[in-house]
Image (cartoon, rainbow, N blue to C red):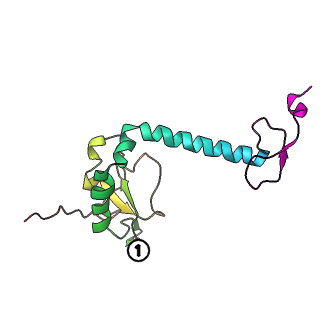
């Protein structure tokens, strides 16, 4: 006989759910899938935190210095749509050549483009085929003046 049918019918362990289940984990089918998805996302996040390149994104040098300088000097999305520059506010600093390919270019302004979330291609591959003047306007980056 099927062991799942031998288990008593119980309410789903998910808070607020009124569904009943015989699942050994205590969740109904809907919450079993949602929790499995959340578990895989947590595992992906845990693995990423151990990656040396991903650790660089979590440093003050990236978050508070370099990234903010790029966004400060390029506050408008740099992506060209036809002959016009996107008019949205830039929120993402995108690497043309991914630091996973060339870690030495992670903090190189000419390898970075400030984009809005809608124009950001996503992923981790970068966009090495993008050309200034065709795909995006040139990045402005000024070092602080020390007098």
Query: Nearest the camera: 109 or 57?
Result: 57
Q: The magenta stretch spans which residues?
A: 1-25
Q: Under tag 1, what secondary structure?
A: loop
Residue drawn at (82%, 53%) of the image: 18
The image shows residue 10 at horizontal and vertical percentages of: 85, 43
Q: Is residue 141 left or right of 98 when viewed as pictured?
A: left
Name the residue located 35 percent from the left edge and 51 percent from the top edge: 96
114 w.r.t. 97: above or below: below
Report the residue that reaches farthest toward the right.
1
> Magenta region, mostly helix, strand or loop?
loop
Residue 11 is inside the magenta segment: yes
In the image, 125: left or right of 107?
right
Left or right: 7, with 144 as reference point: right
Q: Examine the rendering and report whether any part of residue 38 can be seen.
A: yes
Residue closer to the observer: 114 or 26: 26
Relative to 8, is 28 on the left or the right?
A: left
For the question of whether residue 135 can be seen, the reply is: no
Q: Relative to 145, does residue 129 appear above or below in the rendering? A: above
Residue 47 position (above or below residue 116): above
For label 1, the residue is 87
Mark 1 neighbour class, 10 Å CA radius: few under 14, some 14 to 19, many 20 or more? some
Q: Residue at x 77, y 40 (%)?
A: 26
**At 76% from the left edge and 43% from the top edge, which residue is drawn?**
27
Residue 83 is situated, as x and y percent measured from the top left of the image, at: 38, 71
- Placement of the C terminus among the 4 image quadrants: bottom left
Nearer to the camera, 79 or 123? 123
């Amino acid at each position: 006989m099927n062991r799942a049918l031998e288990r008593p019918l119980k309410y789903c362990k998910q808070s607020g759910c009124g569904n009943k289940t015989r699942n050994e984990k205590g969740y109904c089918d809907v919450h079993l899938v949602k929790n499995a998805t959340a578990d895989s996302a947590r595992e992906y996040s845990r693995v990423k935190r151990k990656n040396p390149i991903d650790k660089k994104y979590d440093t003050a040098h990236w978050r508070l210095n370099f990234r903010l300088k790029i966004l400060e000097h390029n506050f408008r999305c740099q992506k060209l749509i036809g002959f016009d520059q996107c008019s949205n506010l830039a929120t993402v600093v995108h690497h043309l050549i991914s630091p996973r390919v060339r870690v030495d270019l992670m903090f190189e302004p000419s390898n970075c483009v400030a984009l809005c979330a809608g124009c950001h291609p996503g992923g981790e591959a970068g966009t090495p085929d993008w050309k200034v003047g065709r795909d995006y306007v040139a990045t402005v980056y000024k070092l602080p003046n020390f007098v």
